[in-house]
Amino acid sequence: MKLHSMLLTTAATLAIALPSLPAFAADPDLLVFDWAGFEEPGLFATYTEKYGTGPSYAFYGDDDEAYQKIASGFKADVAHPCSQMVSKYRDAGLIEPWDVSKIPEFANIDPIFLNSPIFKDESGVWYIPADWGVTAVAYNPDQVPAEDVATLDVFLNPKYAGRTSMPDSSDDVWALAYLATGVTDWTNISDEQFTAAADWLRKAHANIRSYWSDPAEMSQIMASGEVLVAWSWNDGVTFLRQDNYPVAYQREAKEGSSTWFCGFVNLKNGPGSEEKAYDFINSWLRPEAGPELMKAIGYGHSNTRAMDLISDEERENAGLAEISAPILSQVPNDPGLRERQLAEFEKIKAGF
């Protein structure tokens, strides 16, 4: 995705922010509420072959934003939350189980992505894991020495005051802050650990140029030269490389980096076709979608057969190879802690 098309994606995302109307209109019988940038034709190719067009999309840039819109009455057929959000959708009664007998490739999803009763229990399968990736340090190696990004305290380094960026995503910034303060498991956080991470974030906030709302925006501010160091997902790095921008991706800072995975939920009372929702999921989960996902966005696929089609070199280039550094996995954690983190993050961004 070149920079000019990223600008269009960002514009579409901004346009959707207020009315929550489809920003990518195609099949009126299926509305997918998704992260900006996932409207890649290779992911729903068999859907298009069957119906002559792809689904309609509405976009968001943050999991909490998406949840609030759905909870406030916005109607779509499927949504694409990351794993730590699924309990909120379930607890609010916004989703219903999938009939996995209609999803043949469900059997080939890596079991590690379903290892929680939040996703799968006696009531059924509530979540279809689809994609995974990492959050780590993207930087311009022409201007930032490798030794500076050997530690996550690069975000506190006065040398980069006004030249750093983080996602406007509570989960990702807290993953960074916990790692930076020595925590790699956020399923059991003490008050002392929370306070230490919050204090670190306040110091990092002083260096922040801006909080990016989607990877296209992150790529643009790095390409412009405004930002030299960013806490980034894989796709922002992929976009910059596609435009031949000098960018490196540091996953092995001494404190580590973060991993996450996302997938699809079946929204209750969706306005479209249930049959088409399953056709969409089946297109996404087919093995051939794995290389398409990697090429377009730089993410890994939940289907082990899909990952078998991706070479070790491709995984390494995307930042998905195994590393010898700590990892904080963004697995489901305490909903009360998430709300506390979200509230504290809003205060930090406001300068308090």
Image: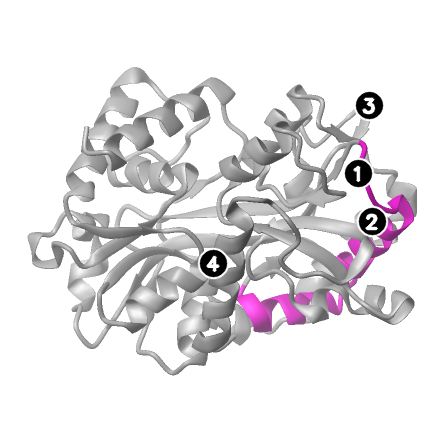
Q: Tell me, yes or no, whether the two marked residues, 4 and 2, touch with CB atoms within 8 Å.
A: no
Could you tell me which secondary element the residue under label 3 belongs to?
A: loop
Considering only order in the chain, which callout, 3 or 2, is on the residue closer to the N terminus?
Answer: 3
Q: Is residue 3 above or below residue 139?
A: below
Part of the protein shown in magenta: 269-298
| Quadrant, the C terminus | top left
Structural crowding at the residue carrying mark 2, measured as other residues with C-alpha within 10 Å and reported as few (<14), some (14–19) or many (≥20): many
Return the residue at label 4. Answer: 322
Q: Residue at 46% x, 18% y: name it.
A: 336
Q: Tell me, yes or no, whether the two marked residues, 2 and 1, touch with CB atoms within 8 Å.
A: yes
Residue 294 shown in magenta: yes
In the image, 63 versus 137, the foreground residue is 63
Return the residue at label 2. Answer: 277
Considering only order in the chain, which callout, 3 or 4, is on the residue closer to the N terminus?
Answer: 3
- Tell me, for residue 123, which label it has, or none: 3
**Label 1 sits on what residue type?**
Gly
- Would residue 320 be visible to someone looking at this image? no
Query: How many angstroms separate mark 2 from mark 1 (CA)?
Result: 10 Å
Query: How many angstroms separate mark 4 from mark 3 (CA)?
Result: 35 Å
Could you tell me which secondary element the residue under label 4 belongs to?
A: loop
Q: Residue at 60% x, 74% y: name it.
A: 311
In the image, 239 versus 70, the foreground residue is 70
Return the residue at label 1. Answer: 270
Q: Tell me, yes or no, whether the two marked residues, 4 and 3, touch with CB atoms within 8 Å.
A: no
Considering only order in the chain, which callout, 3 or 1, is on the residue closer to the N terminus?
Answer: 3
Number of numbered tags placed on the structure image: 4
Q: Is residue 56 left or right of residue 279?
A: left
- Tell me, for residue 261, which label it has, or none: none
Foreground label between 2 and 1: 1
